[in-house]
Image (spheres, grey):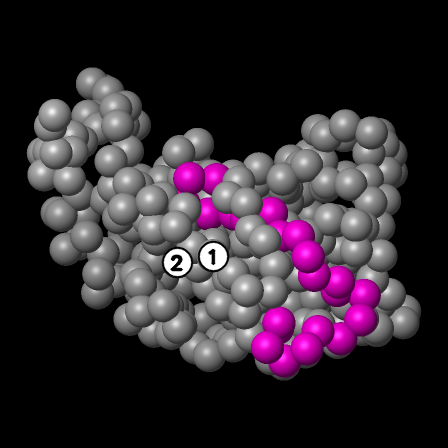
């Protein structure tokens, strides 16, 4: 019998004429198998994606978690990158209190908030308010100290549609060839709050927001401060350009890097139900809110935890 541990690792090939790979994503194997071997004392976890995502059972988020349970839940978050927990009818106060266990929370400058706690940003979509979050992104990368953890609670969901997809940005970096890694490891990207919304708001409002939240620069490749792993930290929504690159060269590189998020092998998908909760590591994953439920109503609330300045 062949010992597969020593078999040569196959690699995907580029489809002629396109910046798209096809073939085995063998760079996922070690992380897939490592996660499959994990066990937890205070809850059960079932993998939902190959290298990210776990359905958690056995915890109650409606009341404060014991310190040892919270510590293990946070450890699981760093392993699986995103956790899904169903049937959690959290109050606004419980939701915000859970977020504050992870660190300081942000108040979003544009999104409406839950009136019970300003730390909860409310996303309410219906026949008159459309969703524009259906593009891969990390949240609020336009801050000097961006979000490190997000906790999303479903209040009302459509009968079908409105799923959220997540993609593993460690795996995205690992998928790159050596030449691309050498090119990007020391590059910086400029993140601009108004980059994506400039056509949705009046010019005077854009100028006001840009003055209050001027563009910031973050590394294209960051090192996670907890796991020590490298991950891509660029997205099409908030990155205006690569520092030092021409406009066309910047667009070409950003498109090539952002395409790594598009691979289903790097992803998992969550179908919401009322009182479902998703907790994700906003550095390790990007997410995409499918906008396929109009004119039905979808209401979710998010608490975001801010953290250290991203670094190489």
Q: Which mark is residue 39?
A: 1
**Where is 145 relative to 157, above or below?**
below
Circle count:
2
- Which stretch did the figure color magenta? 49-70
**Label 2: how many Cα within 10 Å (few below 14, some 14–19, many 20+):** many
Residue shown at the point (24%, 20%) measured from the top left: 15
Q: Give the SS element for disc 2.
A: loop
Q: Nearer the viewer, residue 169 or 271?
A: 271
Q: Say whether residue 70 is visible.
A: yes
Where residue 173 sits: x, y (%)?
Answer: 29, 50
Q: Nearer the viewer, residue 235 or 216?
A: 235
Residue 54 lies, in percent from the top left, at 55, 48
Q: Nearer the viewer, residue 155 or 133?
A: 155
In the image, 143: left or right of 32? right
* Between discs 2 and 1, the one toward the N terminus: 1
Which quadrant is the C terminus positioned in? bottom left
**Residue appearing at x 28%, y 33% in the figure:** 25
> What residue would you read off at disc 2?
233
Q: Could you tell me residue 148's position as x and y percent?
A: 52, 68
Residue 53 highlighted magenta (yes or no): yes
How far across and down, in percent of the image, does residue 8 sit? 9, 34
> Closer to the observer: label 2 or label 1?
1
One can see residue 237 in this view: no
**Snapshot quadrant of residue 255:** top left
């Amino acid at each position: 019998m062949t010992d597969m541990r020593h078999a040569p690792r196959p690699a995907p090939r580029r489809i002629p004429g396109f910046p798209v790979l096809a073939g085995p994503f063998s760079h996922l194997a070690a992380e897939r198998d490592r996660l499959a071997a994990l066990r937890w004392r205070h809850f059960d976890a079932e993998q939902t994606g190959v290298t990210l995502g776990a359905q958690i059972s056995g915890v109650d988020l409606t009341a404060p978690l014991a310190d040892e349970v919270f510590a293990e839940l946070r450890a699981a978050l760093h392993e699986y990158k995103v956790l899904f927990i169903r049937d959690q009818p959290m109050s606004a106060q419980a939701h915000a209190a859970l977020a504050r266990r992870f660190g300081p929370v942000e108040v979003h400058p544009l999104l409406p908030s839950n009136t019970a706690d300003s730390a909860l940003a409310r996303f309410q979509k219906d026949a008159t308010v459309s969703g524009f979050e259906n593009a891969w992104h990390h949240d609020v990368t336009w801050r000097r100290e961006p979000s490190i953890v997000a906790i999303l609670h479903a209040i009302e969901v459509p009968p079908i549609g409105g799923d959220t997809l997540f993609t593993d940005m460690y795996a995205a970096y690992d998928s790159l060839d050596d030449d691309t890694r050498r090119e990007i490891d020391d590059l910086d990207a400029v993140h601009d709050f108004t980059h994506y919304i400039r056509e949705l708001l009046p010019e005077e409002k854009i100028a006001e927001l840009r003055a209050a939240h001027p563009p910031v620069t973050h590394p294209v490749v960051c090192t996670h401060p907890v796991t020590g792993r490298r991950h891509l930290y660029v997205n099409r929504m908030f990155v205006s350009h690569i520092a030092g690159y021409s406009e066309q060269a910047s667009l070409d590189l950003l498109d090539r890097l952002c395409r790594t998020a598009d691979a289903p092998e790097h992803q998992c998908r969550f179908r919401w139900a009322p009182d479902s909760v998703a907790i994700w590591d906003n550095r390790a994953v990007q997410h995409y809110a499918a906008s396929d439920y109009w004119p039905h109503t979808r209401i979710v609330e998010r608490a975001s935890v801010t953290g250290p300045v991203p670094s190489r």
